[in-house]
Image: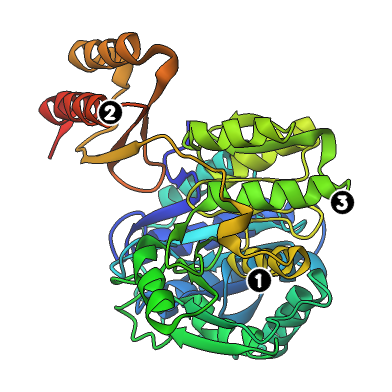
Amino acid sequence: MRKLFGTDGIRAVAGEAPLDAKTVHAVGVALARKLAEAGRPVRVVLGMDTRESGPWITSTLIGGLREGGAEAEFAGVITTPAIAFLAKKHGFSAGVVISASHNPWQDNGIKVFGGDGYKLPDEVELEIEREIERVLATDVEVREQRSDLPPVNEKFRREYVQFLLSAVPGISLDNRCVVIDCANGAASTIAPQLFESLQGTVEVTHASPDGRNINANCGALHPEVVAQEVKKLGASLGFTFDGDADRALFADEHGNVVNGDAVMLACARDLQARGELANDVVVATTMSNMGFEAALKRSGISMLRAPVGDKYVLEEMRKSGASLGGEQSGHILFPARATTGDGLLTALVVLDVVHRSGKTLSELIADLKSYPQVIVNVKVREKRPLDSIPSVVSAIRTAEDELKDSGRVVIRYSGTEALARVMIEAESEAAMRRHADAIADAIRAELGI
């Protein structure tokens, strides 16, 4: 079982294990050694988001990579999907992003893509973890934080922008006004340039990162912010990204928040109409709403559910041959266009669907009637198996027995934070909240901080 890698790489408070300088250096050494097993020279491209810890983590990791025999090139502040694109385009052995995505600025992380542009399988991450342990066991020197970054290769960002535009040819704002919330993150370096070339009015917000304001009351964690701005300006659409811009949420022309389920519904119907929705199937996760599944069914589209995490959605898509998948949180996968979830690409695709349909976003998803859904996050001191705690099992069973076919219960640990997530979906909002609170209270009593 993996100890360092979660559902989206290694993530922790910057400066604390496993993101202390010594372990970060060991990650670089271990990754270089693992990549060298292929028998070819090891070249790695790295990028980071806007957190103040990004430079020293990146520099320390590069030091480890070089000690392990790898060459490293630096793309600077850039989005996570851009690194996946660059790794594949230029034949790098791997791509690495220093980012904690939607987490607060104090956190950071290390995400690794293979040379094919895809996230590493769990078993490969486990092998890297074992090598990290060997490095740490033999290298007892405590590494100081480094800050000497290599020069930024400026062409990388230009290539990524050109890729996005070529992935959705003929895209245009049609003189619309759109609002873009960059979350003071990696999108700040790309989104303004990208959208201002599309023949419309672009209002850019939260694109002034200072190292500590990433995701702070903005971005995909707070989609109501861009929704309010759309309503205030009378704009046609709003886009909002997370810290590393691998996901996006939206606001329609009325200032209503539009989540990943609704985006997938609009895109699925568009692909189906053009004969490009493979097997008439969409892959979502256990968190996607039952109302989304019902709306797909009305269009003759079936839905498969994967565990939470876009890498697991992609695994299920490969098994089923699906051409569309994603998460309610805004990770949307278009495998014909890109190897990983990409918020900027998703925004362009949605623009394209709106452009070609001649409809507004709200019209495209008007029949989506979501069941009431609540998610309660419980901070935990440990991630003990929930099915081993009688009080939690009893609370879950009570909810499932009462809700039956009129709701769902999904309880899981976060793969990136010390949280248990309690999700209840039901026709009755009162029942939904009652059961969510009961299960959360049971978890809190046993494992709460």
Which badge, 2 or 3, comes first in the chain's sequence? Answer: 3
- Gap in Å between the C-alphas at discs 3 and 1? 28 Å
Rendered image coloring scheme:
rainbow
Name the image quarter holding residue 358. bottom right
Mark 2 vs mark 1, CA separation in Å: 40 Å
Q: Classify mark 3: helix, strand or loop.
A: loop
Q: How far from the left and from the top, in percent, is residue 438?
A: 17, 24
Q: Residues within 10 Å of mark 3 (few under 14, many from 20)?
A: few
Tell me the kind of residue under disc 2: Met
Residue 91 visible in rendering: no
At mark 2, the secondary structure is: helix
- Three-letter code for the amino acid on which mark 1 is drawn: Ala
Residue under label 1 = 82
Q: Which residue lies under the disc numbered 3? A: 274
Residue appearing at x 28%, y 25% in the figure = 384
**Residue at horizontal 67 percent and vertical 84 percent from the top:** 157
User: Is the residue marked by circle 1 packed among few (<14), some (14-19), or many (20+) residues within 10 Å?
Assistant: many
Is the residue under label 3 in contact with that under label 2 (CB below 8 Å)? no
Secondary structure of the residue carrying tag 1 is: helix
Give above or below for 431 relative to 390: below
User: Which residue is disc 2 drawn over?
Assistant: 432
Image quarter of the C terminus: top left
